[in-house]
């Protein structure tokens, strides 16, 4: 898998994460710290915003990882993720990144809070599906975390809808948590832990 990179005294394997989202890359890098060095699309010289034309998280995650396999011939994983709000029939779902028509986190959150005005049932969940392409085979790993949508945004950390999402059993939003705290419970971390277990079995993690 990938090549070998020498980082100080430690020899880290490299693995491509097909993302342009630096926050996702930072979360995942922490989970793989000391074992794999993550290379993003930018790191491999890919300036493409890979079209997400699928109708499910699985489809879109696979489109991202397959793009890298097809054009760069590298083992790779990609994640498609989003927020599903029960009272909104699971919107914004796969359209989370562009819910308000562009990629503005502020715009997306404002639209969400507007659409939920007057709604008391505020249950929601974050979902991630990771598609891993390893030796020309495709594997999927899923993670989800349940919670509620706050009536106002709070917190400065993270990205996307983190300031309005309070995970179940907690009294702070994801945006009030450090990356390490979020990585204890998040949808992406749950999926990544499954991927790491898989790599341990199949690629000598
Ligand atoms: P890449 O496709 O380049 O990986 P992206 O941000 O476009 O980056 P997605 O297509 O998977 O990623 O869209 C996910 C959107 O869902 C993201 O932009 C956020 O708005 C939201 N989202 C997903 N995971 C999240 C998280 O952990 N915290 C907050 N919002 C999240």
Image (cartoon, grey):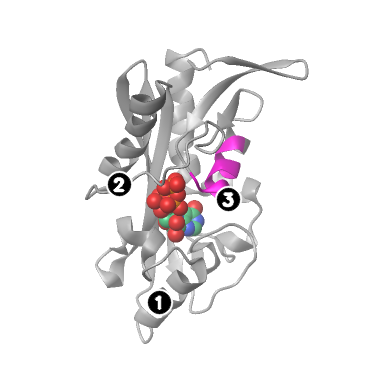
Dot 2 beta carbon under 8 Å from ligand 1: yes
Q: Quadrant of residue 115?
A: bottom left
Q: Residue 182's mark?
A: 3
Judge depth for marks 3 and 1 and give the one in front: 1
Q: Residue 57's mark?
A: 2
200 vs 108: above or below: above
Task: Specify the segment rendered in magenta.
Answer: 20-29
Instruction: State the residue in front, 5 or 183.
Output: 5
Query: Does the rendering let one see residue 89?
Result: yes
Q: Would residue 21 be found to the left or right of residue 72 on screen? A: right
Name the residue: 41% across, 37% down: 78
Q: CA distance from mark 1 to mark 2?
A: 22 Å
The residue singled out by tag 1 in the image is 111
Q: Residues within 10 Å of mark 3 (few under 14, many from 20)?
A: many
Residue 123 within the segment the image draws in magenta: no
Q: CA distance from mark 2 to mark 3?
A: 21 Å
């Amino acid at each position: 898998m990938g090549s070998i990179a020498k980082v100080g005294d430690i020899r880290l394997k490299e693995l491509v994460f097909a993302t342009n989202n630096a926050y996702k890359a930072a979360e995942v890098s922490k989970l793989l710290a000391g074992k794999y060095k993550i290379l993003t699309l930018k790191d491999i010289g890919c300036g493409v915003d890979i079209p997400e034309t699928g109708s499910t998280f699985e489809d879109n995650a696979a489109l991202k990882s397959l793009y890298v396999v097809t054009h760069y011939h590298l083992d790779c994983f990609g994640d498609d993720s989003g927020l599903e709000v029960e009272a909104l029939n699971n919107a914004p779902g796969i359209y989370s990144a562009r819910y308000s028509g562009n990629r503005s986190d502020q715009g997306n959150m404002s639209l969400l809070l507007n659409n939920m005005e007057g709604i008391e049932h505020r249950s929601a969940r974050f979902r991630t599906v990771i598609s891993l392409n390893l030796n020309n085979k495709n594997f999927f790993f899923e993670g989800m975390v349940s919670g509620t949508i706050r009536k106002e945004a709070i917190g400065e950390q993270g990205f996307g809808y983190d300031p309005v999402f309070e995970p179940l059993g907690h009294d702070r939003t994801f945006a009030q948590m450090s990356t390490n705290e979020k990585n204890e419970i998040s949808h992406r971390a749950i999926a990544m832990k499954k991927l790491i277990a898989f790599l341990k079995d199949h690629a000598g993690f």
